[in-house]
Amino acid sequence: MQKLSGAQRKKLVKDEKKKNRGTNKGRKFGKVTDEVELCWKLASGLDCAFGEKCRFTHDVKAYLSVKPRDITFPSSQALSATPPFVVPPEAGEIDPAFASVNFATSCPVFEENGLCRHGLKCRFLGGHARKVDDSPGIEVVKDQKREDELRNAVTELNFPGPGTLKRLRTKQYPTHVANEYLNVLQQQKPNQPKPSEPFDEEGNRIIVVAEFDESQEDTPDVPLRPVEKKRLRWEGKTYLAPLTTVGNLPFRRLCTTFGADITCGEMGLAKSFLSASKEEWSLVRRHPSERTFGIQLAGNKPATLVPAAEMMAKEFAGNLDFNGAGSALLDQPGRLGKILVGMNRALGKIPLTLKVRTGVKDG
């Protein structure tokens, strides 16, 4: 064994520390494999192109004989708010020929899509399998009607229009209302120094009396009315608040099945939306079951929030929720007011809600 020098040992220790640095470095992810590995093509009910040369087994009976028994999952009707909370489903009769298959279970993927891509490898195999006379005595079934309905149905909504992301990346997306509002804010200079007062040669202040302009006299004209906002009728409805990294589309779909009337997407950064981030734009997608859906924008500057609000008003309908990204804006009421006024104008008839903390410190 070669003897290492002191410098080499230090380098090895340093590299080992660097390798173990970070989050979850101590976790070990083991690979789970079947005792008998069945060919994926055969498990899905398709023909294997490799035939006898396939490195996976084609013996279905041998695979099912060592496969764990199917899982039974209770339906939503079996759940309750009182003990025992869950009514266990019936285990079903055990067929000696297919001891691992429980024909009384149901596969949630098959019930939703009419097809389970896991086929014979599914842990809910009994929900989409039937006995046949031909070898190997069992086959995977499909719900062709449900599959056709799903193929023609819309599964997700709120996709950006054609060319939207490209125009955002090239800074060519039109936001006329936001641009006009931001120009007005730019012209306002609150820190502009006051003009020096005039003095005569002896140092006495000269008082200037402005002449009265009759054209500036108040007139009985009716002031312009702002655009009437769409009223939010949320009385007696259940609202699922936006939950970052939790309130994704699958989670919200589950909540709608359990009675959520109003849902809101995960918090998205206004700056990332304007830079056409695909990860950020995926947060605004919704399922047709989410009938009342909102989008939450986060930021602390009018220069990004107002254009993002106008863009959302053009691309999607619904309501928009503003997240001030903490409590710092409560100490800056001027900036907060400019943000809310600008977003309100940019949204037009779309209502704007605000998520804000009750204070900046405890007590």
Image (cartoon, rainbow, N blue to C red):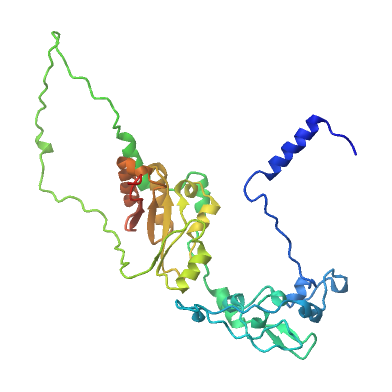
Residue depicted at 51% across the width and 53% down the height = 280
Judged left or right of residue 103, residue 354 is left
Front-lying residue, 77 or 304? 77
Image quarter of the N terminus: top right
Q: How many marks?
A: 0
Q: Position of residue 77 (x, y in %)?
A: 49, 81
Seen as rendered, the residue at the extreme bottom is 133
Residue 175 in view (yes/no): no
Q: Indicate the quadrant where residue 121 lies.
A: bottom right
Q: Residue furthest top?
A: 202
Q: Residue at the location (58% across, 80% down)?
A: 146
> Where 38 sits versus 315, above or below?
below
Which x, y percent locates residue 160? 49, 57
Look at the picture and state if 292 lies above or below 362.
below
**Seen in the image, is 67 located left or right of residue 181?**
right
| Camera sees residue 292 | yes
Measuring 45% from the left and 48% from the top, which residue is drawn there? Answer: 270
Residue closest to the eye, 305 or 89: 89
Q: Is residue 203 above or below residue 190?
A: above
Q: Could you tell me residue 168's position as x and y percent?
A: 49, 48
In the image, is residue 147 above or below residue 211?
Answer: below
What percent of the width, then of the height, locates residue 258? Answer: 45, 73
